[in-house]
Amino acid sequence: KAGVTQTPRYLIKTRGQQVTLSCSPISGHRSVSWYQQTPGQGLQFLFEYFSETQRNKGNFPGRFSGRQFSNSRSEMNVSTLELGDSALYLCASSVGQGARNTIYFGEGSWLTVV
Amino acid sequence: DAKTTQPNSMESNEEEPVHLPCNHSTISGTDYIHWYRQLPSQGPEYVIHGLTSNVNNRMASLAIAEDRKSSTLILHRATLRDAAVYYCILRDVNSGGSNYKLTFGKGTLLTVNP
């Protein structure tokens, strides 16, 4: 069974540009969530989608957005990139929501903003 | 949210058992104990989880104290591939059906010596 797939794995962008990251959850998983991981802040929740609806959003500016498609695949977009957006962006999926459902993470997309 | 406390680092020798402790003295009755690990340059990987009883799977065992205020992740025979940061987290089954409260602390950096 394929795991959570994230693309691209590595990318470099310039300040002011925008970026789109893609996530394919494990087959049958309907819940997708996104996290930002940096050495200083650790793992921070960005947003969560279930059945194409955003269910929760973390404390990030409006430059960070996402969506989920009918096949559960998800994308996140960051506009007007800042140097501080350099981080590992992780996508995670689970069958459903709630603590009884195991969350599986992808390998992440490493974003460097220069 | 209930917090967890883990040692910053631990060291083990290859082929030997490793016991990774986690304290969660403020755990509530509805908190599941989850363990994840993160290898360098990869996303977190689910290891094991439990509520009250000890749990075993192909990766590890989870021993939960009778009062649930602490738990121990047991790797029966450490290999070099087990070198990673191990995170102990609590997930409340009553968190509104959402995964958004998933937060990782600093975890324990496990070094495995050949």
Image: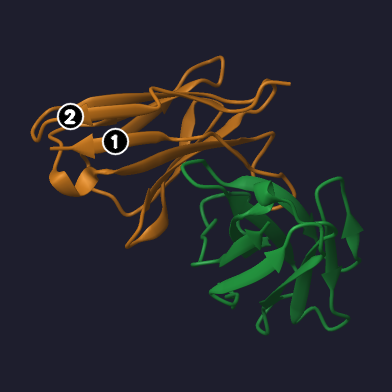
Chain colours: A orange, B green
Q: Amino acid at mark 2?
A: Lys
Q: Is residue A112 visible?
A: yes
- Percent x, y for residue A18? 18, 27
Q: Quadrant of residue B87?
A: bottom right
Label 1: chain letter? A
The residue that appears at 75% across and 82% down in the rendered structure is B69
Q: Is residue A53 left or right of residue A59?
A: right
SS state under label 1: strand
Label 2: chain letter? A
Q: Is residue B93 visible?
A: no
Residue at the farthest front position? B114
Quadrant where the N terminus of chain B is found in the figure: bottom right
Q: Are marks 2 and 1 in contact (CB under 8 Å)?
A: yes
The residue that appears at 55% across and 56% down in the rendered structure is B102
**Circle on res. A13:** 2
Earlier sequence position, callout 2 versus callout 1: 2
Please tell me whether residue A13 is drawn above or below residue B11 in the rendered image: above
SS state under label 2: strand
Q: Amino acid at mark 1?
A: Leu
Residue matched to label 1: A111
The residue that appears at 74% across and 62% down in the rendered structure is B32
Q: CA distance from mark 2 to mark 1?
A: 7 Å
Residue at the farthest left position? A16
In the image, B16 versus A9, the foreground residue is B16
- Percent x, y for residue B13? 72, 64
